[in-house]
Amino acid sequence: MKDEYSYIEFTIGNLDRFACLQKMFEKLKEVKNNWLPDIYLKEKNDLNYSDPVDSFPWKNYLDREAAEWFANTFDFDSEEGIIYWKLLELTKPEIRSQHPFFKTPGNWYFESMLDAIFNGDYFLIDLIKEKKNQGCLYYKPRAYPFGGSGSLVELIKSFGNKITYDSSQKNNSVKDSEWNFELAKKLVKEGIGFTPELLQNRNV
């Protein structure tokens, strides 16, 4: 399957929680693959369009820990969130879109993750246990760029699993956030955009 599809490998944290993840994945797969033809209705503002994020009780598929995961989000309306947006505007596009400094701490909003999954230009294929403690999610992009795998990674992590390999990532690496609020505040105050060298050369 790995020769045919894009995939994300992960270490399974708990088999019961993995079963919950599989159940949610299968429902996402069913809804997404049936909904893809209707995306054009959305673009045309057709009254027959039904948003899949709002049309199903998705939170019922979360276990307690997953619900807590999605409660821990980055507040873009807070002082820190406002600084984040201001620094984003000061920074060159190629840096802000690629560097993990702009990968916010905290987790995705649940509805944002669902929206990204449904709008990603790919088919969901399968989510299986391949070894004793290793799982893999398979999907098939319809075209490139397809919207990225970040929302699928978030789905997997929210059920207590650890990502070990993402075939869509350059250099096969999954980078953690390098966001630094104190440095960001100083840069915004000085009207300076972020550059990677600042993490090594600037004392905070």
Image (cartoon, helix red, strand yellow):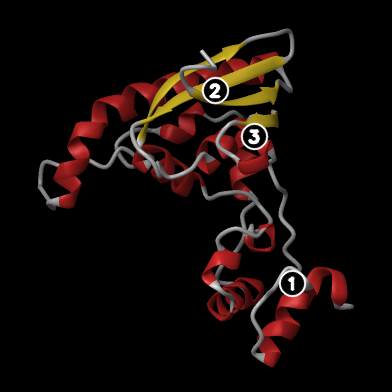
In the image, residue 201 above or below residue 156: below
The quarter of the displayed image where residue 189 is located: bottom right
Percent position of residue 82, x then y? 58, 76
In the image, residue 66 above or below residue 132: below
- Callout 3: helix, strand or loop? helix
Q: CA distance from mark 1 to mark 2?
A: 34 Å
Query: In front: mark 1 or mark 2?
Result: 2
Q: Earlier in the sequence, mark 1 or mark 2?
A: 2
Relative depth, front residue between 41 and 58: 41
Amino acid at circle 2: Leu
The structure residue drawn at horizontal position 52% and vertical position 39%, both measured from the top left corner, is 149
The structure residue drawn at horizontal position 68% and vertical position 25%, both measured from the top left corner, is 10
- Do the CB atoms of the residues marked 1 and 2 lie less than 8 Å apart? no
Q: Earlier in the sequence, mark 1 or mark 3?
A: 3
The quarter of the displayed image where residue 99 is located: bottom right
Which labelled disc corresponds to residue 137? 2
The structure residue drawn at horizontal position 66% and vertical position 73%, both measured from the top left corner, is 80
Percent position of residue 50, x then y? 21, 40
Please give left or right for residue 48 compared with residue 21 in the image: left
Amino acid at circle 1: Phe
Q: Which residue was labeled with disc 3? A: 157
Relative depth, front residue between 195 and 102: 195
In the image, residue 9 above or below residue 107: above
- Callout 1: helix, strand or loop? helix
- Callout 2: helix, strand or loop? strand
The mark total stands at 3
Amino acid at circle 3: Lys
Which labelled disc corresponds to residue 181? 1
Q: CA distance from mark 1 to mark 3?
A: 24 Å
